[in-house]
Image (spheres, rainbow, N blue to C red):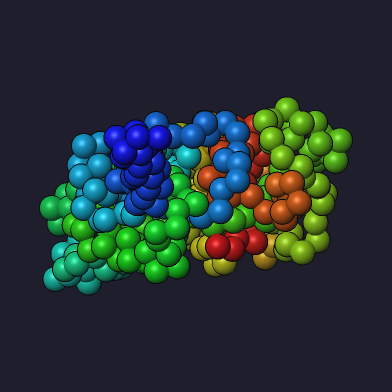
C-alpha cells in the first residue's frame, strides 16, 4: 500500500471515530427541557410511570401562556407536559383576604361558608363553598368588606422520568418551593399513589347493582369490591332540593349536633346531599322538621374498591381521579373519595 493510501485510510478511521464519539456524547448530554401542552391520553392509565406529576392551582385569570412562563422559570430538568385548566381536579371558589381584615372574616369560617384560612404571602386564602356563592347574605358581607369571590385554575403537570441527570428526591421539592413563592400559584401538590376508592351508594343499593355500575365504567385495571364495609360509622343523609336548601339549612341551624361539620353539603344534579347525625334522627324536633319539609333520612351503603395496576397494589392519583369523576356522575352514587395514598 502506498504512503498516500495509508494516510487516507488513517484519516477515514480517525473521522469515523470522531463521528461515533460525537453521537455518544450527544446521547449523554441532558436534552433541553421540552414543554408540551398535549397530555398523555387521560382515558387510560399512564404505563410505566415511576414519578408522580404535580397538581398546581393558579389564581383566577391565569392564562395558559402565563402558566408556561412560570414553569419555564422553575428550571425543571426533565421534559414535561401541561394539562391546562384540567377537569380532573375541579376548580374551587376562594377569597383572598388581607391579613389586617382576617379577624373580621374568621367569624364566617364554618362548614357552610369558608374553610380555615391558609397564609399566602401577606394575605390569607379561604375556600368558599359552592352553596355560599349562592347565599345573598354571605355575598353581601363580602361586598361590604370589598372582597371578591374568585375561581382557581388547576393544572396537571406530567413529568417524564427515566433521566439520569436529575434526582427527583431533591429536584421535586425544589420545584415545589419555587412555585409556591410565585404570587399566581395558590397550591402545589405532588401526585400520590392510591390504593382504594371509597364509594358511598344510595340506600338500598345491592351488591349485584354495585358490580354492574362498576362494570359500566372504563376502570382499565383490576379491582376487587368489599361491599357494605363495616369500618365506617353508619352514615345517614337526606336529599334536599336546591330551591329549598337555604330554608332547610336555616332549620338545621336551630338544632344541636344535627349535622356533621366535617361533611359539607354536596351538590348532585338538582339536589344537595346533607349528612346528619344518628343523634338527630332520635330528636323529636328534628323529625318534626323533616315532616314539615317533606324530607326523608336514609342510610348509605359504603363500599371499598381496592385498586390494582398489574402486580402493584395501587394506581396513580391522576387515574384514580379520572375514575372518581366518572363514578360521581352515576345517580346511585353519593360520594367517592380516595384512600391509602402514598408517594
Residue 34 position by quadrant: top left
Residue 238 position by quadrant: top right
The residue positioned farthest toward the top in the image shown = 216
Q: Residue at x 64, y 50 (%)?
A: 315
Quadrant that contains the C terminus: bottom right
Quadrant that contains the N terminus: top left
Q: Work out whether residue 166 can be spotted.
A: yes
Residue 60 position by quadrant: top left
Q: Residue at x 69, y 36 (%)?
A: 219
Side of 9 where 70 appears, left or right? left
Where does residue 192 sit, x and y in percent of width and height? 54, 57
Compare residues 86 and 303 and report the one nearer the observer: 86
Q: Residue at x 69, y 35 (%)?
A: 220
State whether residue 103 is above or below residue 271. below
Q: Residue at x 84, y 39 (%)?
A: 206
Compare residues 53 and 233 and report the one nearer the observer: 53
State whether residue 222 is above or below residue 120. above
The residue positioned farthest toward the front in the image shown = 2
Q: Work out whether residue 250 can be spotted.
A: no
- Number of numbered discs present? 0
Where does residue 244 sit, x and y in percent of width and height? 48, 38
State whether residue 36 is above or below residue 70. above
Compare residues 295 and 84 and report the one nearer the observer: 84
Compare residues 23 and 250 and report the one nearer the observer: 23
Where does residue 292 sit, x and y in percent of width and height? 59, 43
Where does residue 88 sit, x and y in percent of width and height? 48, 39
Side of 60 where 155 appears, left or right? right
Amino acid at each position: 500500500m502506498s504512503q498516500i493510501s495509508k494516510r487516507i485510510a488513517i484519516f477515514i478511521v480517525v473521522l469515523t471515530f470522531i463521528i461515533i464519539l460525537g453521537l455518544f456524547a450527544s446521547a449523554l448530554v441532558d436534552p433541553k427541557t421540552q414543554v408540551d401542552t398535549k397530555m398523555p391520553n387521560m382515558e387510560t392509565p399512564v404505563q410505566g410511570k415511576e414519578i408522580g406529576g404535580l397538581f398546581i392551582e393558579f389564581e383566577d385569570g391565569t392564562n395558559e401562556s402565563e402558566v408556561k412562563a412560570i414553569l419555564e422559570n422553575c428550571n425543571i430538568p426533565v421534559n414535561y407536559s401541561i394539562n391546562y385548566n384540567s377537569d380532573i381536579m375541579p376548580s374551587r371558589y376562594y377569597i383572598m383576604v388581607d391579613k389586617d381584615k382576617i379577624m373580621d372574616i374568621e367569624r364566617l369560617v364554618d362548614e357552610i361558608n369558608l374553610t380555615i384560612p391558609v397564609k399566602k404571602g401577606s394575605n390569607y386564602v379561604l375556600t368558599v363553598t359552592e352553596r355560599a356563592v349562592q347565599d345573598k347574605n354571605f355575598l353581601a358581607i363580602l361586598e361590604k368588606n370589598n372582597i371578591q369571590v374568585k375561581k382557581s385554575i388547576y393544572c396537571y403537570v406530567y413529568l417524564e422520568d427515566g433521566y439520569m441527570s436529575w434526582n427527583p428526591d431533591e429536584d421535586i421539592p425544589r420545584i415545589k418551593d419555587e412555585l409556591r413563592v410565585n404570587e399566581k400559584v395558590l397550591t402545589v401538590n405532588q401526585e400520590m399513589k392510591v390504593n382504594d376508592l371509597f364509594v358511598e351508594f344510595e340506600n338500598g343499593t345491592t351488591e349485584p347493582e354495585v358490580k354492574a355500575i362498576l362494570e359500566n365504567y372504563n376502570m382499565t385495571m383490576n379491582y376487587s369490591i368489599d361491599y357494605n364495609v363495616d369500618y365506617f360509622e353508619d352514615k345517614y343523609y337526606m336529599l334536599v332540593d336546591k330551591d329549598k336548601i337555604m330554608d332547610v339549612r336555616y332549620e338545621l341551624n336551630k338544632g344541636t349536633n344535627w349535622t356533621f361539620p366535617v361533611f359539607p353539603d354536596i351538590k348532585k344534579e338538582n339536589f344537595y346531599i346533607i349528612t346528619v347525625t344518628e343523634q338527630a334522627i332520635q330528636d323529636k324536633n328534628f323529625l318534626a322538621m323533616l315532616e314539615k319539609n317533606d324530607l326523608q333520612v336514609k342510610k348509605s351503603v359504603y363500599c371499598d374498591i381496592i385498586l390494582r395496576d398489574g402486580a402493584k397494589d395501587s394506581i396513580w392519583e391522576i387515574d384514580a381521579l379520572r375514575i372518581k369523576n366518572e363514578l360521581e356522575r352515576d345517580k346511585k352514587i353519593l360520594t367517592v373519595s380516595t384512600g391509602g395514598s402514598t408517594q
